Image (spheres, helix red, strand yellow):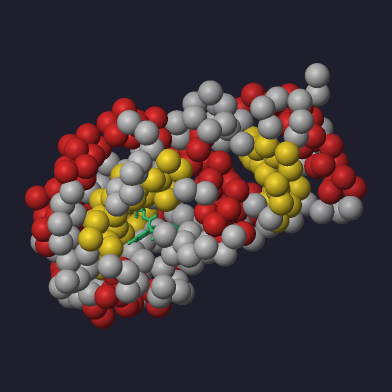
Amino acid sequence: MTRILIVNPQAPEPDLIAEAAAVIRAGGLVAFPTETVYGLGANALDPEAVASIFVAKERPTEDPLIVHLASVDDLPRVVRQIPETARQLAQAFWPGPLTIIFPRHDDLPRGVTAGLDTVAVRVPSHPVAIALLQASGVPIAAPSANRFGFTSPTAARHVFTDLEGRIDMILDGGSPTIGVESTVLDISVLPARILRPGGVSREALQGVLGKVDVFDGTAAEVEKKPLPSPGMMSRHYAPRATLILFQGADTQAVIQRMRQEAELYLQQGERVGVLVAEEDQIAFTGSGAAVKSIGSAGDALQIARNLYAGLRGLDESGMDVILARDFGVEGLGLAILDRLQRAASRLVQVESSS
Ligand code: TXA
Ligand code: MG
């Protein structure tokens, strides 16, 4: 049985948080909101609790987890050493959507880090996450609270759909403000390297660190190199429908091409959904495709916030094919592009029409 507790996202009720914290301390699983996506939390210092995360999610055990802390002061409980760069980054971005890779503490259960000598850590900013961490008094290991391979949850309802009956509790604190996962950053190399683009942009990191690289997981896979971040296989975050991603600098040309492809699929009797910006909707009126707007194209935060719910929504309404477009690579655009690429079965590069 999975209990759902509705909490005030800004000022979580202490008695409800105490109930959730008791579940964590007893070795149970609690899904909770963070500013990025919902996490599936367990006591990071309890090997059995950590193991049960993998069972509930059907997640491969070689995919390491992120450890969440109430404060930067708790770092020595889970890491062996704190590089100066990490202190600077923590100062600038914690609490917030940045995950930093550290040398792991010897006492941390092996299951958390999937046998790696490093551990991924972040201090979340969501009031419910902070309250839960404080009340539990332990570091909380938490992957996104979805079944493995599916889209991350940005509503308690998404968690319930994926994990009902498999976890003890869901804290329902509404929708996260960012909507895509944290940025995962490797600071053991120079320049530091983004392993997963996310809530903290490359530009913001560069403001603190100077040059920052972005690791291209797709290229490494093609070359069969070992991945620095084992969980990052390219097909991930996938809806059930076939997702086709249209990319190109000329938005008009991209939209026109999407409309053509939508018509082709519709003629074949497929159910077609398009995931687009408000401004793009008009191009699909009368096309017969289901149109889902996820916000204004110029507002990457709004697009990020609505992205996963948009994908899930089209999926749940039974689409066979979903057509989506990119929103550039600046700011949150890079994380949006990364998730769409990982979810896509096919990429269509659209050349400018002029
Ligand atoms: O925003 C987020 O990061 C959310 C919320 C709940 O905090 N969590 C999340 O966790 O997205 P998960 O497990 O879905 O993604 C964690 C990513 C994985 O891709 C994993 O490969 C990477 O972090 N990771 C974890 N430990 C690592 C390590 N030691 N070295 C490199 N990558 C690591
Ligand atoms: Mg995940």
Task: Give 137 or 166, whichever is nearer the viewer.
Answer: 137
> Ligand 2 shows up in which quadrant of the image?
bottom left
Looking at the picture, how far across and down is residue 134, in whole percent? 12, 55
Is residue 121 positioned above or below 334 on the image? below
Taking the spot 33% from the left edge, 64% from the top edge, the residue there is 65
Taking the spot 40% from the left edge, 75% from the top edge, the residue there is 61
Looking at the picture, how far across and down is residue 172, in whole percent? 33, 53
Say which quarter of the image contains residue 169. bottom left
Taking the spot 58% from the left edge, 32% from the top edge, the residue there is 327
- For the image shown, how many numbered marks are present on the structure? 0
Is residue 75 positioned above or below 261 on the image? below
Question: In what quadrant of the picture does the N terminus appear?
Answer: bottom left
Taking the spot 27% from the left edge, 61% from the top edge, the residue there is 119
Looking at the picture, how far across and down is residue 295, in whole percent? 54, 31
- Taking the view exactly as shown, the residue that stands out farthest to the bottom is 48
Whether residue 305 is visible: yes
Residue 330 falls left or right of residue 115: right
Task: Give 177 or 158, whichever is nearer the viewer.
Answer: 177
Residue 135 falls left or right of residue 207: left
Task: Give 228 or 168, whichever is nearer the viewer.
Answer: 228
Looking at the picture, how far across and down is residue 57, in whole percent? 43, 70
Residue 338 falls left or right of residue 88: right
Whether residue 201 is visible: no
